[in-house]
Image: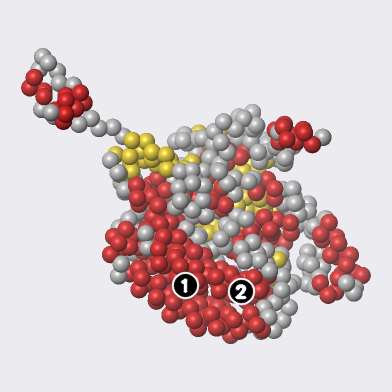
Amino acid sequence: MAFEDQRTTIYKVDPEHPESETLPALRTEELLLNMGPQHPSTHGVLKVIMELEGERVVKSTPVMGYLHRGVEKLAEDGTYHQFIPHTDRLDYVCAMYNNFAYCRAVEKLLDLKVPDRAEYLRTIVAEVQRIIGHLFWLSAQALDIGAMTVFFYCFRDREILLDWFDELCGARLTTSWYRIGGVERDLTPSLISKLKAFLDYFPPKIDEYQVFLEKNRIWLARTKGIAVISAEDAVNFGLSGPTLRGSGVDYDLRKYEPYSAYPKCEFSVPVGKNGDTYDRYWIRMMELYESVKIIKQCLEQMQEGPVMAEVPSVTFPPKQRVFTNLESMIQQFKLFSQGFKAPPGEIYCGTEAHKGELGFYIVSTGGGKPYRLKIRAPSFIHMGAFDHMARGYMISDACTIFGTYDIVMGECDR
Amino acid sequence: MHQLAKRIQESFTSGFVGASEWRGDVAVTVTRDKVHDIAEFLRDDPGMDFDYIVHVSSVDWPDDEERFEVVWEFYSIRKRHRLRLKTRVPESDCVVDSLTDLWKGADFMEREVYDMMGIRFRNHPDLRRILLPDDFAEGYPLRKDFPLRGKGWRDTFEFLDERS
């Protein structure tokens, strides 16, 4: 009886047309859902306004900028050297890559040649950073999808490398180890032996992660055929890195515009076929093996030598000399107080970071500060394709799509 | 002159302003009204084949008559060459054609340029601020006349007054 009453109040039977007492057609309407700010798996503070039809995404509008700090404006107020610590805070998970990309851009502006050993060290540390980045990505993505175990295993190995960074430069995340014209210091024998030990230890661990995931039905169901983007669309949207290579486009700046010690190393660039989340996962796993290969080759080929270019007007003198030699002290003082003057002109320099193409566009008018510095952040550009990739998928896949970009909001919002 | 710049000059004699090559980067300056035509040519011409948009940026030159410079950087994945396209926009009429119909990736990049420098893009599907809040009323922060510390609202916080 109670049920009958309830039904009549909800459906309001029209007394003049008793036949309408049968269930009327269900009213449908699109639901607008605010996802975020700060959904746990959005990898930072981000909001997405989703238009939903049931649980399917019809349209999504990312709302960004919660982490905007005006880095490009700050760059215009400091010397070229002073901007290096700012780059740490772009992609705070992988600071080394930002340092690397920025230093390369300034070196292109100055037409500065970096010593051979420094190039090898840069490549080694960049690839170590790539391993850290991919491990972080894998753990976060697996956690988003619900596979928690992988998270602990990845962080166990990431921790070894972060401690290695700690020994290298005194910081685990905000490293600032790269310098314009070289690197801050050489690897010590202890660091080299630790790295070699890690390289022997690590490849079997990659197989281990794959065991967790590649036979896991939930993982496969939630990555295969999810967030598919065709090669044409991926290129048209300006995607880069594993996100682009997953769609079958063989675009890697390390091969296309070789820099640092990459042309001297043999490695392959894994390319996917289907453009789905699983292919992008597979590419990152394969890149872990390739990174190990690159680091091993660099360690073998590396010769003794200076780790910093000797251009007194630009590069810092070695610390020992600052305390004993008057010229070096003056050089140090002038570089710290005034910086160096870059020739007028403009350059763009892109570097293949583990997320994609991280580029710096620098305009110089001949002063000691950049006149304009623009950061081409892969996370930001990947977010541009979010709406396109999320359409037609379920709400729960939205987390997968954020994850598949390897998005870090510090870089996205700058 | 680089051969890519020469091709553009031959195809668009009226829109071509100048070209430069520095540190291996080729930059072509064009007039504002021809930007869309030239961009379309860059994308569709088989010799150019610029299928990839790298970034959209802008530079403020307050002393110049045409104050803003809009910069596009293109890359061709098949041909493996790079080109920078530039145009000048006066402050009084801060509008340039949007390239979102040619490269979908230009959508967010142009929104960022609008947000930071106040340059509007004609025919852009959704030209709103992207990094700053929608109700940000202090202007465009990357312009050179925008102070580094903001326009003074930080000094209006009450806890700062108490200290003095």
Between A325 and A397, the one lying in front of the other is A397
Please state the total of marks drawn on the protein image.
2
Quarter-of-image position of residue A223: bottom left
Query: Alpha carbon of mark 2 to alpha carbon of mark 1: how far?
Result: 17 Å
For the N terminus of chain A, which image quadrant?
top left
- Disc 1: which residue: A288
Q: Position of residue A24 (x, y in %)?
A: 15, 28
Q: Is residue B80 left or right of residue A80?
A: left
Q: Determine the residue positioned at 63% across, 46% down.
A: A69
At 64% from the left edge and 32% from the top edge, which residue is drawn?
B139
Q: Which mark is residue A164?
A: 2
Secondary structure at badge 2 equals helix
How far across and down, in percent of the image, does residue A49 sit? 42, 39
Query: SS for tag 1?
Result: helix
Q: What is the chain identity of the residue bearing mark 2?
A: A
* Residue A283 % position (x, y): 41, 67
Q: Residue furthest front?
A: A1
Please state the horizontal and vertical placement of residue A356, each as a whole percent of the image.
50, 60
Q: Amino acid at mark 2?
A: Trp
